[in-house]
Amino acid sequence: MAETVGMTCSEVDENDKPSHSVNITDIPSAFDNNETIRAGRNNADIEVDNLVNREIGEIITCEKGNKDEMTRCAELELVVTYCKKRLRKIDDNIERVQLMDKLVQCQLELDALKEELSGPVKNAITVMGHQFFLQSATGRNPYCEVCLSTIWRLVQSYRRCNSCGLRSHDKCVKHVLRYCAGTKANDVLFRLVNYELPRTEICEERGLDVQTYKCAECHHSLQFDGTTESEPRLCDYNGHYYCPRCHWNDEWFIPARIIHNWDFGKYKVCRASKQLLVIIERRPIFNVSKLNPGLVNYVDQLARINKLRRNILLMKCYFMCCKVARKQRILQNLKHRQHFVENSDMYSLIDLVDLYQ
């Protein structure tokens, strides 16, 4: 049996010509215990890994000798090419596993580097408040929110808004009708206007005639009992009706329902409202005591957190001056909710959701 194994190994050596030899003594006996077998396999793995790394190092060194300068991307491409060619020639399972690991690791690093190097181009296109930047051709295929079709990144160029994340084919950018939610949220007047508009009041029911039977965003005609494309969909955040192209039946928390009814159900909102709510969810723009003064009398969690925040403000100087308090890093633990150490009235949407949960 040992002779058969030896012959098989020599045949592999002659056909594939690997740089290391396999001896019968390297093959563990069938009567060896499990620990010896495991140790032998680990040694073989290390041996093969060292061999692969040595061969890769020699290839890179040789290539560097032919060129004045070599980038990391070029090195990784060489390694990937070497691993692929080597995998086609060898039959040894141990070496195949090592090469596959090396191939996957180098390919992932190469993709990440290419993504970083071929990131957004400097020149941007401004449309409806959006800042559209050209994106790279690698990665998952996103969805165009203008023509509602898949963006095949390898063959189609596309742009993404850095403020709200809206994605669109390069050719569809000029047809964007939705104003940028990020630009709207970053407006200095947004915080003041937010209290006057019905965004903090539950929207009243209204009919399609108020919108002259048209979508509030793209002005596409709407009608009940009509075709799917003209189906009116209500946005619970602003009370307007939208067509299926502008309203994808996304569900989100509605600030007005939380503030007035302590209702944390998710309601259907249009794409524009969804993007806006996602952007502002961590911003402390809701003064609950002003919008609904009586809520604290009915919600124990809110009463407790209000008292705790007032105590934090009273002890803020102590937290900053006392050595013991500085060691406990109390203020640093609130770095993600900085408004807790600045006032006791303002809440963000995520604050209220976390408080409820």
Image: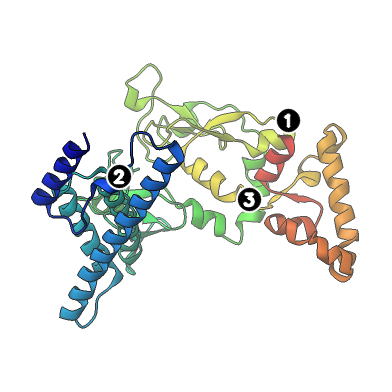
Check disc 3: other Cα within 10 Å, few if <14, some if 14-19, many if 20+: some
Q: Which residue is mark 2?
A: 141
CA–CA distance in space, label 3 to label 1: 21 Å
Q: Quadrant of the C terminus?
A: top right
Q: Which residue is mark 3?
A: 282
The residue drawn where x is 71% and y is 55% is 337
CA–CA distance in space, label 2 to label 1: 40 Å
Q: Establish if 154 lies above or below 7.
A: below
> Which of pointers 3 and 2 lies earlier in the amino acid sequence?
2
Q: Which residue is mark 1?
A: 261
Please state which amino acid type lies under the numbered disc 1: Asn
> Which of pointers 3 and 1 lies earlier in the amino acid sequence?
1
The residue drawn where x is 11% and y is 45% is 11
Give the color scheme: rainbow, by chain, secondary structure or one colour. rainbow
- Front residue of 200/9: it is 9
Foreground tag (3 vs 2): 2
Foreground tag (3 vs 1): 3
Tell me residue 356's x, y (percent).
Answer: 73, 35
Q: Image quadrant of residue 137? A: bottom left
- Front residue of 260/14: it is 14
